[in-house]
Amino acid sequence: MRTAPASVRRVGSLSFRWRPRVVVLCGVLALVLAAFAILLLGSGTLSFSAGEVLAVLSGQGDNAKAERVLLRIRLPRLLTAILVGGALGMAGSIFQSISRNALGSPDVIGFTTGAATGAIVQIMLLDAGPFETSVAAVLSGVLTAVAVFLLARKGRSTGGYRLVLVGIGVGATLSGVNTILLVSGDLDQAASAQLWLAGSLNTRTWSHVVPAAIGFAVVLPIAILHARRLNLLEMGDDAARQLGVDAERTRLVMIMAAVGLTSIATAAAGPIAFVALAAPQLARRLSASPDVPVVSGAMMGMVLLLAADLASQHLPINIHMPIGLTTGLLGGFYLLWLLVRSRSI
């Protein structure tokens, strides 16, 4: 892949490097995201035109029914989707960079499964509500990541294929635990857990949006500030250390940031496959940038999740599938294509 050129800008004593093609890509993604958002807000049992949607969002609408539907039901659902897609896209970028593997996404290497384990324990054993389930998903996702990180550690390094393989093994074990919990519990609780495991944006409220927004806002600056160090790590630990980068500390911080993003997304909408796998790769291909696509990967994740949501609502067979099943189906085809095309996996 041909690398896009970079430009350097100076502001006083400060200088920063940027790639025009990446900026253009982010601008295009922002426009596509806005178009998808208007389509999603306007589509449903009650349809609204783009003008009506924009009028309500700008506070100039005079349709009380449209205001109730858009502001209380569809807008929280849309914002949850945007936050979840952005979190997964950014997490996938970090994991793929650290593992140096195209399959290094949280749903492939077990972190999403680990987050699901905590939620299932809350639902099946403690009959907990949505808040307790979300907290348990975040905590179990973090604990799973710590376990994978420690098991994958060899000498002074953690990463590469070892991290992917250990993650797959831990994920397979936790998947078995999840199945045991589902078949050994109450039928109604098992049905509730299965609905959660399908991954859904339905019935999302502002109580889902606010925690996801806070978590995303906290982790985002950490990921952006460490992105340059992550770029240097891709040259190898020895080269990064010679350039003054604490390789293992940077890797640990970024893994925790990615795990936090994954757990936030899983807590808000349940397990969502495919997005963290595909978004960074698509962003990198379109931008032709060798840098870790932290921001562009996040925006691509937002666009992909909204596109999948639109597809799930407008299937020709008139079946409204949960978003997690839709992304999983699309992700299966994408993974097969990736394995067939790639020579490095």
Image (spheres, rainbow, N blue to C red):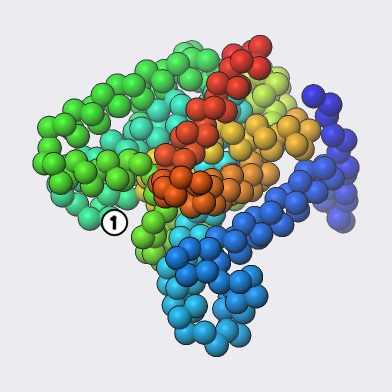
Instruction: Say which of 180 and 100 sits in front.
Output: 180
Mark 1: few, some, or many residues within 10 Å (few <14, many ≥20)?
A: some
Question: What's the amino acid at mark 1?
Answer: Phe
Give coordinates of residue 110: x percent, y percent. 40, 28
Q: Residue at x 70, y 21 (%)?
A: 235
Residue nearest the observer in this picture, 220 or 204: 204
Image height check: is 86 above or below 248? below
Q: Position of residue 186 (x, y in %)?
A: 11, 41
Residue 257 visible from this viewpoint: no
Residue 326 shows up from this direction: yes
Q: Secondary structure at mark 1?
A: helix
Q: Is residue 83 left or right of residue 22?
A: left
Q: Residue 225, percent across and down?
A: 64, 45
In this figure, which residue is indicated by the disc labeled 1?
Answer: 131
The residue at 29%/56% (across/down) is 131
- Left or right, 179 with reference to 53: left
Q: Name the quarter where the N terminus is drawn.
A: top right
Q: Is residue 214 above or below residue 283?
A: below
**Residue 330 placed where, x, y %?**
52, 34
165 over 98 or under it: above or below: above
